[in-house]
């Protein structure tokens, strides 16, 4: 059985970090890269060399830039859930998926995207770690319905005695 995986269809195959970053900066500039990815190396004294130095040390940031390259700059369709779990360089791009033109991005679109993500995160937090979508998020668990709302006794408050004295 042949376990060889062909990564040659992946646009990141054989592409160095410096070449990748140079392409992105020439096309979008540091302001757009920071607006979309929120990585400080694109905001604070940005340069290709300092960004490469940071990205080589920081896996999560490098993977974020590589994913941006694949799905915004090369306009590839989103990865399947199984491929999404892998780092971008390890993803297998199906034969029929060919890179397209870079997405047209703007600072206004980045701000709208940031607001949308913040709202989604707030909904997620508000719902106890469940997304705000679907009926199941509105349902309380059995334990939550059965427990009456209780307040902590005054003795549990370390400042309770101080409040009474003053």
Image (cartoon, rainbow, N blue to C red):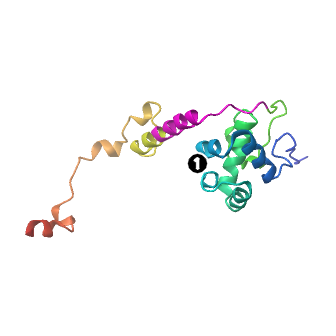
Which segment did they paint magenta? 100-119
- The quarter of the picture where the C terminus appears is bottom left
Does residue 79 appear in this view?
no
- Above or below, 147 against 138 in this view is below
The mark tally for this picture is 1
| Residue sitting at x 45%, y 38% | 119
Q: Position of residue 65 (x, y in %)?
A: 69, 48
Between 117 and 90, the one nearer to me in the picture: 117
Residue with the most extreme front position: 45
Q: Quadrant of residue 81?
A: top right
| Residue sitting at x 77%, y 44% | 91
Query: Does the magenta portion include 112?
Result: yes
Q: Position of residue 39 (x, y in %)?
A: 61, 51
Q: Position of residue 93 (x, y in %)?
A: 80, 38
Does residue 4 appear in this view?
yes
User: Callout 1: helix, strand or loop?
Assistant: loop
Q: Position of residue 16 (x, y in %)?
A: 82, 52
Query: Does the magenta portion include 117?
Result: yes
Q: Quadrant of residue 7?
A: top right
Magenta-drawn stretch, dominant element (helix, strand or loop): helix
| Residue sitting at x 74%, y 39% | 27
Residue with the most extreme right position: 2
Classify mark 1: residues with Cα within 10 Å, few (<14), some (14-19) or many (20+): some
Between 165 and 128, the one nearer to me in the picture: 165
| Residue sitting at x 73%, y 47% | 88
Q: Which residue is mark 1?
A: 38
């Amino acid at each position: 059985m042949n376990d060889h995986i062909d990564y040659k269809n992946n646009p990141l195959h054989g592409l160095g970090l410096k070449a990748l970053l140079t392409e992105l900066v020439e096309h979008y500039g540091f302001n757009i890269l920071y607006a979309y990815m929120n990585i400080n190396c694109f905001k604070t004294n940005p340069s290709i060399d300092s960004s490469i130095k940071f990205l080589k040390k920081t896996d999560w940031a490098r993977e974020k830039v590589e994913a941006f390259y694949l799905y915004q700059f090369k306009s590839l369709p989103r990865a399947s859930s199984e491929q999404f779990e892998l780092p971008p360089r390890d993803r297998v791009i199906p034969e029929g998926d060919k890179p397209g033109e870079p997405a047209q991005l703007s600072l206004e679109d980045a701000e709208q995207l940031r607001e949308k993500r913040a709202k989604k995160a707030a909904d997620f937090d508000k719902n106890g770690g469940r997304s705000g979508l679907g009926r199941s998020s509105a349902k309380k668990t059995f334990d939550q319905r059965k427990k009456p709302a209780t307040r902590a006794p005054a003795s549990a408050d370390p400042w309770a005695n101080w409040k009474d004295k003053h």
